[in-house]
Image: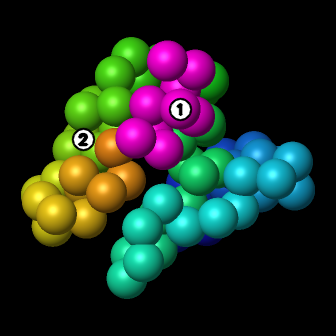
Amino acid sequence: ARSYGDRAVKVVDYVRSGFGARLVDGYPFIEAEVVYSKDYELAQTAEDILYRRLQLGLLDEEATRRAYPRVVELMGYK
């Protein structure tokens, strides 16, 4: 709720749809945030999500590398 305010309900809807897993151990970011960013914030790339939206890329480069394949998958890229 702190990150998304009144839009948190939409993120929770994604969690209920099966996107509740954490992207990487040790950080609170979840799959639902990726899907939400793609669908509602018009995020276009995995880098946009990891560095600008979630800011994981600014916190931990190794964790970002581990999360990257799943973010790409969630965004629908192959």
Evaluate whether residue 6 shows in this view. no
* Up-down relation of residue 38 to residue 20 (above or below): above
The kind of residue tagged 2 is: Arg
Q: Please state, as top left, top right, bottom left or bottom right, where the N terminus lies in the image.
A: bottom right
The answer to whether marks 1 and 2 mark residues whose Cβ atoms lie closer than 8 Å is no
**Quarter residue 60 falls in:** bottom left
Pair 1/2: label in front: 1
The kind of residue tagged 1 is: Glu
- The spot of residue 22 in percent (x, y) is 55, 67
Q: Is residue 72 magenta?
A: yes
Q: Which residues are magenta?
A: 69-78
Question: Magenta region, mostly helix, strand or loop?
Answer: helix
Q: Which residue is drawn at the image coordinates 31% and 57% (left, top)?
A: 66
Classify mark 2: residues with Cα within 10 Å, few (<14), some (14-19) or many (20+): few
**Left or right, residue 62 beside residue 54:** left
Which residue carries the number 1 mark? 73
State the scheme by which the image is colored.
rainbow
**Left or right, residue 37 beside residue 53:** right
* Up-down relation of residue 75 to residue 53 (above or below): above
Secondary structure state at the residue bearing disc 2: helix
Which residue carries the number 2 mark? 52
Q: Which residue is drawn at the image coordinates 49% and 18% (left, top)?
A: 78
Evaluate whether residue 25 shows in this view. yes
Q: Is residue 54 magenta?
A: no
| Residue at the far right in the pictured view | 16
Classify mark 1: residues with Cα within 10 Å, few (<14), some (14-19) or many (20+): few
In depth, the one of 21 and 53 nearer the eye is 21
- The spot of residue 73 in percent (x, y) is 53, 32
